[in-house]
């Protein structure tokens, strides 16, 4: 069963990465969802973490970008047309009625429009995938490219000098 799930996740991630230049995902509170006994098994079977990892490197392979919307980004509660934010939202609500402009939209379509705006704005870029995705020549380990990351045997905030070996 695990190999079937892994194969399905690989195919889904490869299809998304090949079809779209930019892929946006929301950072979900999976731990909180697992606390709900009625959802725990279904959520655990999905492999959200594995899919996110696969999307990260497969979009990089295809020259695209992978954007992760912060867990607290109000994609579902903000109306995409005028920006009005609903104070609270239950899981049972499936449509979004704006109290400012009166328009009605499907909850998920509205959230997708907000995530599209987020991707177009350039905010929330995930640029922490590390060094090169594919292995280089033997013996050469790719450098982690995260800003502020301490290199081996070095700590602090002194920037690395170009052209010097460490």
Image (cartoon, helix red, strand yellow):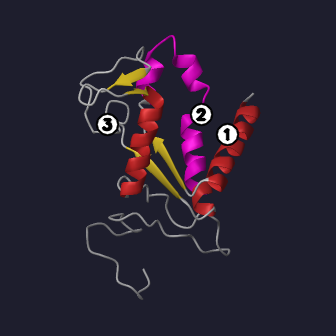
User: Which of the labelled discs sits on residue 134, or is there none?
Assistant: none
Which quarter of the rendered picture does the N terminus lie within? top right
Q: Is residue 55 magenta?
A: yes
Q: In which quadrant of the rendered view does residue 133 lie?
A: bottom right
Q: Quadrant of residue 113?
A: top left
Residue most toward the top?
38
Left or right of residue 163: residue 42: right
Task: Give the secondary structure at mark 2.
Answer: loop
Residue behind mark 3: 72
Q: Residue at x 35, y 28 (%)?
A: 103
Q: At x 46% / y 65%, what residue is drawn?
A: 144
Q: Are marks 2 and 1 in contact (CB under 8 Å)?
A: yes
Residue 47: which numbered mark, if any? 2
- Residue at 35% across, 55% down: 123
Please state the extent of the stretch shown in magenta in the rendering. Answer: 30-57
Image location of residue 100, percent across then percent down: 23, 29
Farthest bottom residue in view: 163
From the viewer's perspective, is the residue at label 2 or at label 3 nearer?
3
Instruction: Pick out the residue farthest to the front.
Output: 102
Q: Is residue 63 magenta?
A: no
């Amino acid at each position: 069963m695990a190999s079937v799930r892994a194969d399905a996740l690989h195919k889904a991630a490869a299809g998304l990465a090949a079809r779209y230049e930019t892929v946006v995902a929301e950072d979900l509170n999976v731990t909180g969802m697992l606390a709900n006994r009625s959802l725990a098994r279904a959520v655990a079977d999905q492999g959200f973490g594995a899919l996110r990892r696969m999307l990260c490197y497969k979009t990089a392979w295809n020259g695209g970008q992978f954007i992760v919307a912060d867990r607290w980004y109000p994609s579902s509660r903000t109306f995409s047309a005028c920006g009005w934010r609903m104070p609270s939202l239950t899981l049972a609500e499936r449509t979004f009625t704006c109290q400012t402009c009166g328009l009605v939209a499907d909850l998920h379509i509205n959230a997708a429009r907000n995530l599209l705006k987020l991707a177009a704005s350039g905010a929330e870029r995930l640029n922490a995938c590390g060094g090169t995705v594919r292995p280089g020549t033997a013996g050469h380990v790719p450098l982690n490219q995260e800003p502020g990351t301490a290199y081996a045997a070095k700590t602090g905030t002194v920037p690395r000098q170009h052209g010097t070996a460490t």
